Amino acid sequence: MMDKKDIARILERAMGHGADFAELFWEHKVTTGISCEDNRIERINSGIDEGVGIRVIAGDKTSYAYTNDLSLQRLLEVAEVAGKAAQKTKSSFQALNFTTPVSKLEFTVEKLPDTVDIKSKAAKVMEANNAARAVDPRIRQVSVSYGDVIQKVTIANTNDIFVEDTRVRTRLSVNAVAAEGEVIQTGFQSVGGIMGFELLEENDPASLGEKAAQRAVLMLSAQPAPTGKMPVVMAGQAGGTMVHEACGHGLEADLVQKKLSVYAGKKGEQVASPLVTVIDDGTLPKKFGSLRYDDEGHPTEKTVLINKGILEEYMYDYQTAREEGRESTGNGRRESYKDRPIPRMRNTYIASGKEDPEQMIKELKYGLLVTAMGGGQVNTTNGDYVFDVAEGYLVKDGEILHPVRGATLTGNGPETLQLVERVGKDLGFTIGVCGKEGQGAPVSDAQPTMSIKELIIGGTGGPGNGQVKIRRV
């Protein structure tokens, strides 16, 4: 952690050429990464990264500079560079009286990753690998990736904010490839949270490996997906990839202010079914996107974005909130000290409803049941999206007919949210690293089981007609 007197000198130097705001972000990050390929531990990476980033805002100008030379002299020089780049004619610096905003959150870490030896971590990776390979002889390849990070930060700015925090995150992911004849399919499963090595004691690595492999094997027998419009039930276990991409990014204030979002200027308007409430929450215990403070020192909070279909709020960092003369929502995040903060999601989800998920499937006359989402693309300007279905089934009269492969979901975010007809009482989370402006940020997203009136299904099996043989899976 850094000395307050030194920080005050650095911020004063940054303000020396005239500015409205200066901020210092110090980061000390210890990371470990282990990967398994071809049935053996292929790489082990561990190391320390430390540095300081300095941001200066003067009017509508922002400058950012960083260094990993932590001598006071060098930090003063970097502050000088950042200050000159954003200078204006008159200085507004005043003596600082640092205070720490109150965060009501305490994330308990039971087993710090740096207290666990590499051998034990590698053993968990091999457990996942071995279990995946044991599922079926058609499993041809398995890759397992483990990672943990202990990140210590100090955040101080000329609004008198001073925050020190430690974030601990651990994750494990498995990707399995199954092959039969010319058919090749993959299965993916991952787990992660703002927690220590206890993650892998609460979540069995072998079960994770088995689930990934079972998904890959299952999809070998899948039939080509039909094409055309049809009702869709998206299971809670599919996670919230769609709400993250098709809705969440469009509610980030920087995109809204640049008019690059379909949700710009729509506060107070009905943008979704009254059954839909969308929340971004940085306070959820153990979730991958949770934080006590964001990367600008603002306590994170639960932000209701869409309330019963009405657009209520966007996600703000300091700069976008300043633009509108309001408070941040605690969504200012950055990948490292090398990056300026920007508005980012944390844990984004659609709130649970009251319906029984199993009953929702039983009452599906004919349509697609999606149980795992793949990758996708979204145009935030107009809300159009396309997503791959990693695991999906054709359903007729409530009976699961067979798995399908090659399915895609195509639609428009706001229009899809308007077509939600039923919302289940469950809630399934998935984790990920969200990319924006070249920066990655750990996030999670979730949704309950939802019935959607109709979506455009892209597939290779021709128009869906329901003339298929029922087979239980």
Image (cartoon, helix red, strand yellow):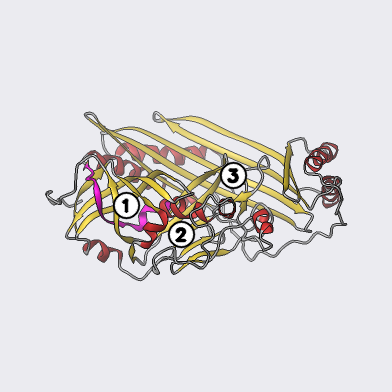
Give the camera-side residue of 413 and 368.
413
> Mark 2 and mark 1 in contact (Cβ < 8 Å)?
no
Residue to which mark 2 is pinned: 349
Q: Earlier in the sequence, mark 3 or mark 1?
A: 3
Give me the C-alpha separation between circle 3 and circle 2.
25 Å
Rendering coords of residue 55 (x, y %): 74, 46
Judge by depth and name the residue closer to the eye, 47 or 297: 297
What amino acid is found at the position of numbered circle 2 in the picture? Tyr
Q: Marks 3/1: CA distance?
A: 30 Å
Can residue 198 be spotted in the picture? no
Mark 2 crowd level (few <14, some 14–19, many ≥20, 10 Å Cα) = many
Q: Residue at x 85, y 45 (%)?
A: 17
Question: What kind of residue is marked 1?
Answer: Thr
Circle 3 residue: 149
Position of residue 229 measured from the top left corner of the image (x, y, whole percent): 25, 52
Magenta residue span: 224-241
